[in-house]
Amino acid sequence: MSIKTYCYNPKTERTHPRPSQEGNPTRQAVTKAAARAIPLLRGVEGCVIPPWRQQSVQGDGQTRAARSLLFFEAPLQSRRYRFNPINMLEIVKTADGSNTIFNAEVGEHYHSTHGALQESRHVFIQSGLAYFLENNPSANSVSILEVGFGTGLNFLLSADYCTDSKISLDYVGIEAYPLSPGMIRTTGYDQYLSAETWKMFNEKYGQALHSTTEFNPHCKLQIANCKLLDFRSNRQFDLIYFDAFASARQPEMWEEAAIGHTIQFLKSGGVFVTYAITGNLKRALKVLGCRVEKAPGAAGKREMLRAVKIV
Ligand SMILES: C[S@@+](CC[C@H](N)C(=O)[O-])C[C@H]1O[C@@H](n2cnc3c(N)ncnc32)[C@H](O)[C@@H]1O
C-alpha cells in the first residue's frame, strides 16, 4: 500500500497534496491546535504522525509556519475512516468525570463541559426517551433519529435504557464526519454501559455506517454518513435527538431550513429534544406544527427545549 502525505482544506472540503504556506498567521494558529491534538492521535486508525511533525511540535520555531496544518498519512481508499482535520480532536474530561471530545477546528466540545454523561442522560434519556415512554405506556418499541451521532453516547445509553425497559429500539444517527473506531474506544464510555452493549457497538460500528445493523433482535442501528440536509428517508420516527454543535459555532444547523428538514422525519405525537433553547428555534418549531415546552436544563443550563409534533 502506498502512503502519501495530504492535508485537508476545510473551506473547499477537499484533500490536497501538502502546500507550502510559510508565514500564514491563520495556519500558525492552527498549528497550536494541531500540536495539542497530536498526542491523542497516536494510535488512531488511519492517522500516522510523520516524524517531521513530531519535531515541530517539540518547538522547531523556524519551520513551524510551514507545518501549520495537521498533515496526516492515510490510505485514501478508506475514505470513511479517513482522519478529517476539520476534526482536530482531543479527549477532554468534563465536570462529572466523563470524557468528551473537543474539536479544535470548530472550537466546540461534543458535549457540555459541565458533564457529558449527565447532559446525555438528562436531555436525551430522561427528557426525551423516558418522557416519550411515560406518555405512550403501551409502546413496546421506539424509533429514534439523532442529528449528530458523534461518539454514539446517546445511542448507547438509549440501548441500555430500552433493554432494561424491555422496549425494542430502532435507531438512526445522522453523522457527516464519523469518528474512527479507535477514537470512540478512547472515550471510556464502557464504564457507564452494560458490557454487552459496549461490545456490540465496538464490533458493529463499522457495519452500521454501511447498513442497518442488528445488535440483537431488539436493537438495531444505522448511521447515515451524510450531512443533515442530504439525509433522505421515507420513515418517520417517535423521537428526534437534536445534538448539533451550538448555534454560535454552526448556525446553519439551527436555521429554519435545517429544523424543517429534521421535523419532516418526526411522527405526529413524536417528541423532539435538544439541549438548547432559543427564540428562533421555538418560533421555527411552532410554525412546523409543534407544541413547544421549556424543560429544566442539564447542569450549566437553566432550560432546554422539548417539542411535541401535533399535526
Ligand atoms: C455536538 S456533536 C454531537 C455529539 C454526539 N451526539 C455524541 O454524543 O457524541 C455534533 C455532531 O454533529 C456532526 N455534524 C456536524 N455537521 C453536521 C451536518 N451538517 N450533518 C450531520 N452531522 C453533522 C459533528 O461531526 C458532530 O459529531
Image: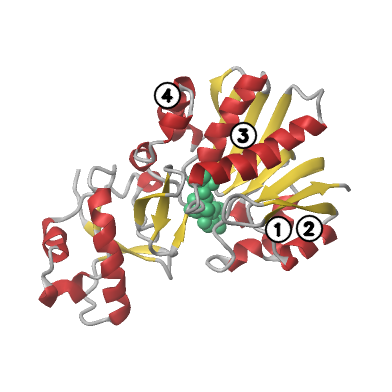
* Total labels drawn: 4
Q: Hey, which residue is sitting farthest right in the picture?
A: 311
In the rendered image, which residue does mark 1 sit on? Answer: 259
* Label number found at residue 285: 2
**First of labels 4, 1 by sequence position:** 4
| SS at mark 1 in the image | helix
What is the crowding at mark 3: few (fewer than 14 residues within 10 Å), some, or many (at least 20)? many
In the rendered image, which residue does mark 3 sit on? Answer: 171
Question: Which amino acid type is shown beneath numbered disc 4?
Answer: Lys
Question: Which amino acid type is shown beneath numbered disc 3?
Answer: Tyr
Left or right of 149 in this view: 195: left
Q: CA distance from mark 4 to mark 1?
A: 34 Å
In the rendered image, which residue does mark 4 sit on? Answer: 199
| SS at mark 3 in the image | strand
Pick the residue in front: 231 or 250: 250
Question: Which amino acid type is shown beneath numbered disc 2?
Answer: Leu
**First of labels 4, 3 by sequence position:** 3
Q: Nearer the viewer, mark 4 or mark 3?
A: 4
Q: Nearer the viewer, mark 4 or mark 1?
A: 4
**First of labels 3, 2 by sequence position:** 3
**First of labels 1, 3 by sequence position:** 3
| Contact between labelled residues 2 and 1, with CB atoms less than 8 Å apart | yes
Pick the residue in front: 159 or 233: 159
Indicate the position of residue 78 as horizontal and vertical percent values.
Answer: 34, 44
